[in-house]
Amino acid sequence: MSQTTDTPMNAATANPAPATAPAAPDKARPVAHVRPRVDMFETDSGYVLRAELPGADESSVEVRVERDILTISAEVDLPQPDGFKAVYGTAGRRHYERAFKLADNVNPQGIDATVKNGLLSLTLPKAQPAVVKVAVKRAE
């Protein structure tokens, strides 16, 4: 499995919100585009991918496979603490996204995803090699 480098997402995440962003009203806070940190491991039966998505839960995370591209994304709103008034802010709303090209031996129908404490864990099983028996006919 390899990380894609030719997706629009990569260009969009290269320039997150500036560090000097003034505080904005809660509803108008800018969205910071964040490229999540990821670890990948291979086992005998498949691959494990773990992505850091602080603030994300199962309702905010989307995992999709289109052709051979696996995309993970989440939209998270980190709320302002009660009783406080924002005077400066670079946190707030975040859009996480990252895309990967699946290895040829991954079975996309068997992918399992869980999230706990902002850590997304994907299990990507390896496809079993198909054995095809070809009928042999007598030539005329």
Image: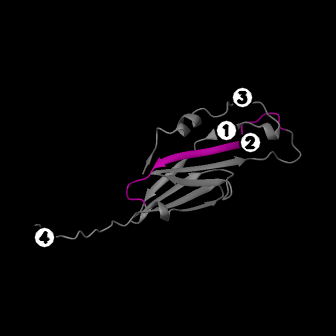
Residue at horizontal 47 percent and vertical 60 percent from the top: 108
Image quadrant containing the C terminus: bottom left
Tell me where the magenta segment starts and ends, as one range: 86-106
Which sits earlier in the primary sequence, circle 2 or circle 1?
1
Cα distance, mark 3 to mark 4?
A: 78 Å
Q: Which residue is mark 4?
A: 138
Cα distance, mark 4 to mark 2?
A: 72 Å
Which sits earlier in the primary sequence, circle 2 or circle 3?
3
Residue reaching furthest to the front? 140
Tell how many labels: 4
Which mark is nearer the camera, 3 or 1? 1
Which sits earlier in the primary sequence, circle 4 or circle 2?
2
Q: Where residue 17 appears, x then y in whole percent?
A: 67, 33
Cα distance, mark 2 to mark 3?
A: 14 Å
Residue at horizontal 61 percent and vertical 56 percent from the top: 119
Q: How many residues crowd around disc 3 within 10 Å: few (fewer than 14), some, or many (20 or more)?
A: few
Cα distance, mark 1 to mark 4?
A: 67 Å
Cα distance, mark 3 to mark 1?
A: 13 Å
Q: How many residues crowd around disc 4 within 10 Å: few (fewer than 14), some, or many (20 or more)?
A: few
Q: Which residue is mark 1?
A: 32
Pick the front one: 66 or 76: 66
Q: Where residue 38 appears, x then y in whole percent?
A: 53, 49
Which mark is nearer the camera, 3 or 4? 4
Q: Where residue 130 appears, x then y in whole percent?
A: 33, 67
The disc at residue 92 is 2
Q: Amino acid at mark 2?
A: Gly
